[in-house]
Amino acid sequence: MTWQIAIFLISLTALLVSSKYFTEAAERIGLSLKMSPFMVGVLIVAIGTSLPELIAGIFASGSDKSEMVVGNVIGANVSNIFFILGITSLVSRKSIHLGEEYIFIDLHFMLGSATILVLFLLDGQVSLAEGILLLLGFGIYQVYLLRSEKPDVVHTLNDEKEIKKGRVAIKDIGIIVLSGAGVYFGAKFTVSSVIDIATHLGVSEAIIGLTAMSLGTTLPELAVSISAARAGKPEIAVGNILGSCIFNAFTVAGVAALIEPLVIPDDIKLTAITFLITASVFFYLLSQDKKVSRFEGMLFLLFYLIFLLKIAHIV
């Protein structure tokens, strides 16, 4: 058991670190090819921070463990809203003000993506056709982003002024190759170790996905959000959280469903779906006054604690 936990922690760390280097190098390449910071943010950074969930989901589906994908997607979204947004509101220098119109449109997409995923899960699974529809939803969201033309509100991981336009650094290509391999093997061993741990503990992979795996794979979002909040730009953190939730519901679940129909075990179905709906709707309602206060952040953290206790059947 100790060995499996060690493998899980090492492989998860490798997955997260590799994803970070992969995303930063991909962003530098995009900027050097004269892509706008907005385009880089939409096509690279937003997807890069959710890369762990996506690759882990692909491996889980390919290993006939689709229930782990559902657990990871739902757990990651609940973690994004309740845990990461809660932490972000506490470390922010001030209340998070949502003055940008794009955030409210993203809120609609976030609530819509959660609603569609829940509707598909009501019968206990996400089929191939439903996976295609989820990917169509993400395509619509990308079209909206690309046509919204809001380059001033995009947060990038590099300083654009340090990037030489028109010249791709050989070092970045090497980083892409090496970090890509790290993402691949990190995700592979993360999934296999989760399966071993779940088997040893006698619990379903879905529960591990809902808790340890989902919290681990959302660490990139946590790091970016805290960094933005400390820099006095908490609105960027909210945009990152919203984008990640939309990507998870539409793309991670959609791509995994193309490999194998996703199923959600009956023992966690009601709890998981209830908390996903609660997190999405609660965040939407609290955001209507265009701010998230520290006290609301504390309430989010309380919800996340209750979520973990419910999943563990402690309360």
Image (spheres, grey):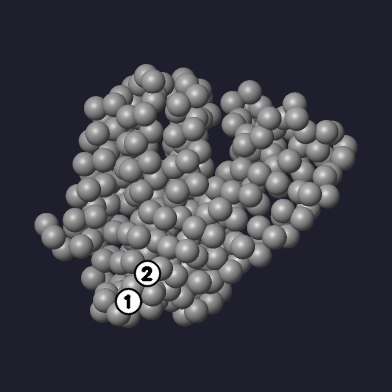
Q: How many marks?
A: 2
- Disc ID at residue 5: 2
Q: Is residue 259 left or right of residue 229?
A: right
Give me the C-alpha separation between circle 1 and circle 2. 6 Å
Residue drawn at (47%, 64%) of the image: 10
Residue drawn at (66%, 27%) of the image: 151
Q: Which residue was labeled with disc 1?
A: 1
- Residue 273 badge: none
- Left or right: 269, with 120 as reference point: left
Q: Amino acid at mark 1?
A: Met
Callout 2: helix, strand or loop? helix
Kindly state the secondary structure of the residue where label 1 is placed: loop
| Quarter that holds the N terminus | bottom left
State if disc 2 and disc 1 touch (CB < 8 Å).
yes
- Whether 199 is drawn above or below 80: the answer is below
Residue at 36%, 48% (x, y): give it: 79
Instruction: Pinpoint residue 8: horizontal percent, then vertical percent.
Output: 43, 67
- Report the amino acid beneath label 2: Ile
